[in-house]
Image (spheres, grey):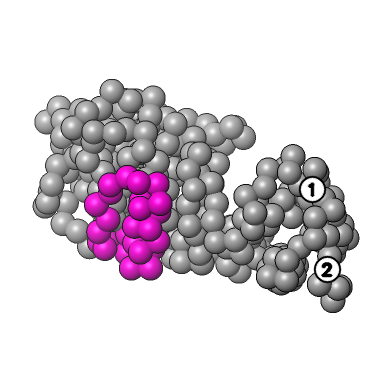
Amino acid sequence: MMQMEATVKEMKKRFREELIRLFSTQEAGHLFWLVMNHLRGWSKTHLMLYEDTKLTHSEHLFAENALERLKNHEPIQYITGETEFFGLLFRVNGAVLIPRPETEELVEWIMEQAGTYKGARILDLGTGSGCIAVALASQLPGNSIEAWDVSSEAIGIARENAEINQVEVDFRLKDVLKVQPGSGDQFDLIVSNPPYVRNVEKEFMKSNVLEYEPHVALFVDDEDPLLFFRAIAQFAIQNLVDSGMLFFEINRDFGDATRELLGGYGFEHIEVRQDISGNSRMVKAVKCVRGRQKSMG
């Protein structure tokens, strides 16, 4: 272990040297900046201007710990305990998924469609960190936002994130798989980023996801990959108002299957949208007037 009087420049060099097997030099430098941003709120400009600054004892210990955890493939967001989503700060830990850029695209799409909403009721199913619900509450003031999750730990983190970002969201510990469709309230918009990664896809995933992010929020059985989409479609066709909208983030391999499923339940104007990488990643559907529910077995 190097001396405790290390400068910012020396520690940055160490990050680059010791993470070379896992990250490019540029990526390692970015990770070190995230550490310093967490510790001191520094921008990348600060990092360059004050590289001769000596780290305090506690800063040095934190950086050392972060370096070791990064070498073990742990996501930097769990190490710092925070991340950014839609320009907002979110607390995260191993009980919730780290918000993805693709989910930001989903929120942007919802904003395009619901930007004029006032007094509407919006429901986020499987909220996790609360990133979708909190972002919508921030961007769509004057609406009522409700969010469910099966994890009490996730609900606790989501509530903290609502407080941090000074928005009101009604978080509830509920499981959409156990809720009777048609019971409860009516909503103008329902959104969900449910588990959609098949177990067979695990071999293609990076270890930082497999070893650290909650599997209950990621994976679904290979035999029934649309389990959550079917349950949510059944709930939504009963609990959306006429012309209410349903949004999903989806597995890129199941765009057509999700479209067919939603059509079978009586949804109309079904649109599958690609993300910035060109993958089918989002779906929007509209409940038709006097929407009908069909049995899908």
Which quarter of the figure has residue 114? top left
What is the x, y in percent for residue 55? 76, 63
Q: Secondary structure at mark 1?
A: loop
Left or right? Give the position of 191 relative to 243.
right
| Side (left or right) of 107 relative to 289 | right
Residue 168 coordinates in the image, percent (x, y): 28, 47
Above/below status of 259 relative to 210: above
Secondary structure under badge 2?
A: loop
Quadrant placement of the N terminus: bottom right
Q: Which of the labelled discs sits on residue 5, or is there none?
A: 2
**Which residue is pictured at 11% across the width and 52% down the height?**
183
Q: Any mark on residue 105, and which? A: none
Which badge, 1 or 2, comes first in the chain's sequence?
2
Q: Which residue is mark 1?
A: 50
Q: Considering depth in this image, is 209 or 284 the residue closer to the camera?
A: 209
Q: For label 1, count other residues whose C-alpha is less than 10 Å away and answer few (under 14), some (14-19) or many (20+).
A: few
The image position of residue 127, as x and y in percent, is: 36, 53
Q: Residue at x 26, y 44 (%)?
A: 145
Amino acid type of disc 1? Answer: Tyr
Residue 173 covered by magenta stretch:
yes
Res. 290 image quadrant: top left
**Is residue 281 visible to the viewer in this orientation of the structure?**
no
What's under tag 2, amino acid-wise? Glu
Relative to 204, is 103 on the left or the right? left
